[in-house]
Amino acid sequence: MSLIDQYKDIEIIDALEERYLAYALTTIMDRALPDVKDGLKPVHRRLLYAMRQLNLSPNSSFKKSARIVGEVMGRFHPHGDQAIYDTLVRLAQDFSVRWPLIDGQGNFGNIDGDNAAAMRYTESKLTSISELLLSGIDEDCVDFRLTYDEVDKEPIVLPANFPNLLANGSSGIAVGMATSIPPHNVEEICNASLHLIKHRNAHFDKLLDFIPGPDFPTGGEIFEDRNTLLDIYKTGKGNIRIRAKWKIERKKRGLWSIIVNEIPYQVNKGKLIEKIAQLIIDKKIPILDDIRDESDENIRLVLVPRNRDINPDQLMEALFNLSDLETKFTVNLNAINNNIPKVHNLRELITAWLDHKKDVLVRRSEFNLNQIKSRMEILSGYLIVYLNLDHVIKIIREEDEPKDKLIKEYNLNENQANSILNMRLRSLKKLEEIKIKEEFDALQNDKTSINKLLKSDKLQWSMVSQEIKEIKKNFSGKTPLGKRRTKINFDTKILNFDLNFNEPSEPITILLSRQGWIKTLKGHGHNINDIKFKDGDEFLIYIEVISDGKSLIFSSNGKFYTVENNQLPSGRGYGDPLSSIIDLQDGDNIVSLHPYDQNFEVLIASKKGYGFIASSKDLLSNRKAGKQILNLTNDDEAVSSDIINGSHVAVIGENKKMLLFAKEELPKMSKGKGVRLQKYKEGNLTRAISFEFEKGLNIMDKNGRKRCFNDIDIWLGKRGQAGKKVPKGFPRNF
C-alpha cells in the first residue's frame, strides 16, 4: 500500500477529534488548571522550583529576574520568556495575590495598570511562604518526573505546607472549562482545617463559621447574604458582589467629601477613575461634581458632591450601579485532583490539602527513617572499631584486602566497612567514641518515635494538626499580613433611592449649521440672525425642544438618527461636529431635524419621487450608526421629511409642478422604498409636506414671507400624477 493510500484510509473527523482531544487535555492538565494539593499550575511550580535550585531563599540576595526566567525556560518550561516573566511578576504583586510567593525588587507594576519594568531591570527571590510550599522537597515526599528534554527532573506537585489554593486562589481558562478560585484568609483556613481533622463530614454551615468568605488582597467589602455564600461553598459555583470601602470626610461650613480607600479585587484604579470622570462629563451622575486621586502607597480617591445637601448613601449607590466600585467575582472551584479536573466544594478542597499533608508527612517520615537506619548502621560499625581498636588497626595495616577481612571478621556489610576505612585518625580518640554513642542512642529514640508515628493514624493526624497550628500562629490575624482585609457584610439590604438623575426639564433650542456643526442654546425665541457660525458656515436648521427629550435627524442616506437633547453640546463656541455624535459618511447631508414624540407620523420622500408615511416609534434608534428607513437606489437620495399635521399632501418638483392629493393614498410603512408620489419627465422631487386642505396651503417665499393659498383645487389630483405648474414667484421648495 502506498503512502497516499494510507492517508486516504484516515477519516478526517477521527483525526481532528484525536488531535483536539490531545490539545484540550494538554491545556487543562499542563496550563490552565491548578492542582488541588499545592494550588499551583505547572508554570508556577516550575518557577518556584527553579528559584530554589538557584538558592534564592528569603535570606539570600536578590537575583536578576532575567536570570531566573532563563533558568525556568531552559530547564523546565520551554515556552515564551514573557509568559514566564508575567507569572513571576504576578506572584510578586501584593495587589494581585493575597500571599505573595515572590519577593520582588524594582518596578513590578501597580494597581493603576502600569506594567512592570523589563526583566533585566528587576530582581527577585522567594518569600517565606514559598519556602513552606517547597519544604521537604528533597526528602522524597513528592513524586518527580522527567523534564521536557528528559535531562532533568521536576516535581509533579510541591509538598505544600501552606494552604495555597484557597489562600491565594487561582484563575484560568482551559478548553471547555475554567477555574476562578478567590483568595482567603490563612488563619480562617487553618481553623476550618483543624475542625475537619476531627470532623471529616463537617456541615458547610459550620465551615462558614470558620471561613465566612474570601479575603481579597485589595480589601473591599463583600456584599452578599450568608445563604448565597453557603450555596457557593456547597456547589463550588456562584457570584460574589464586592464593593469599595468608603467613608465621609467632614469639612468646614457643613461641606464634606467621600473618601474611597479600598477598591474591588482586580479593578484597575486608573480606568476606574476615567470611568467615573466620564460619568461626570456625560451627566450620568449630576450630583457628583468631581473625582480626585490623592493616592500614595495607599488608595485615596476623593469624591466631591455637587452640594452639601446631597445624600452620600444615594451618591454611592449610584456609583455602585454605574462604575466598578462594585464588581462581581465569579466563583468556580475547579481544580485537578489525582489527574482529574473537577469542580469541588469547600470541604473537598480543604480535605484534599489535608490528605496531601498527611501523605507528605508519611513519606517524609519514611525517608527520615531510612536515613536514620543508614546512619545507625554506620555508627554501629564505628562502635565495633572502638571495641576492637587494636585488632582493626592490625587488619588495616597488614592485610592486602582489609575490607574483605573486616567484613568476614566482624560480620559487617560493605557500607560499614567502607566507612571504617574512611575514618580519620583523630576520630579514634575517646571523646569521639562518647559522641558516637550519644548520637546512636538519640537516633534510636528517633527511630522508635518514627516507627510509632508510621503505625498510628491518630499520631499522624496529630502531627498534621501541630503543623497547621504553627502555620496559623505565623499568619494569625494579629500579624500585618494575616489581618483580614475584606469586610463581609451579610446585611445586603439595598437602600431604596431614586437613581434617575435626569436634570430638570428646561426649554432649549437646537441649531444645526450647513457644514454640520450642532449646538444648543437655553430657552426659546432666539433671533437666529444673531447666532455666529464659523467662517464660511451658515445656519441650516433649528428646532425648539425640551432638554430631557429626544430629537430625530434625517440624512440624505435614508437613515434616521436619534440623539438625546441633554447630551448635545451647549452653546459655547461653535458646538461640535455632528459626525462626532452620529456616524455620517462623506457626502451625507442633513435633510431635517425633528423633536421626537411617540404619537406623530412623518412623511418621507426621495429625490426620485418615492415616499411613504412612517410612525415616529419606528424611527427611533439607539445606535450611533442610525436606522435605515428609506431604501434608496444608487442614484437616489432622501430629500424631504415632514411631520404629518393635515389631511392632504403637497408635492413639488424641480420642474415647478405641484400635486396635491389625500394623505390616505400613501401607505404606512416601518421601512422601504415607498410608492411614487409625483411623476416627472425631467427633474426630481424637491419637497413633500402635509397640510390641512380646508385651511389652505401655507408656504414661505424666497424672501421669508409667509403666504397662504386658498384657491388650490387646480392642483388637486391623484397620487403619482405629474401635477400642474405653479404661478410665478411660487418657491420650488415651499
Image (spheres, helix red, strand yellow):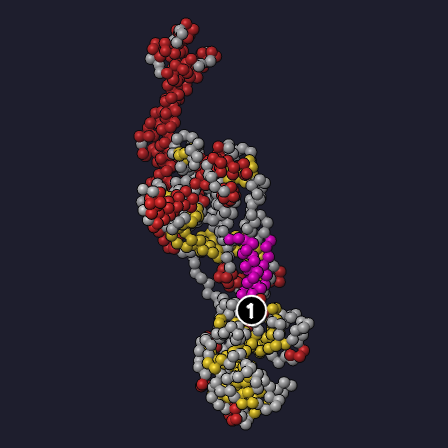
Examine the rendered structure and indicate whether residue 517 appears above or below residue 153.
below
Residue sitting at 47 percent across and 77 percent down? 673
Query: From what the image shows, is residue 75 above or below residue 408?
Result: below
Q: What residue do we see at 57% from left, 85% from top?
A: 655
Specify whether 666 is left or right of 412.
right
Residue 677 in picture, x, y percent from top left: 49, 83
Q: Quadrant of residue 369?
A: top left
Q: Is residue 88 magenta?
A: no
Disc 1 designates what residue?
584
Q: Nearer the viewer, residue 409 or 723?
A: 723
In the image, residue 327 sits, relative to residue 440, either above or below, namely below
Amino acid type, label 1: Leu
Q: Residue 266 at x, y = what percent?
A: 49, 51
Find numbered disc 1 in the image and state the secondary structure of the residue it sits on.
loop
Where does the C terminus fall, quadrant-wise?
bottom right
Q: Which residues are magenta?
A: 267-294
Closer to the camera in the image, 660 or 273: 660
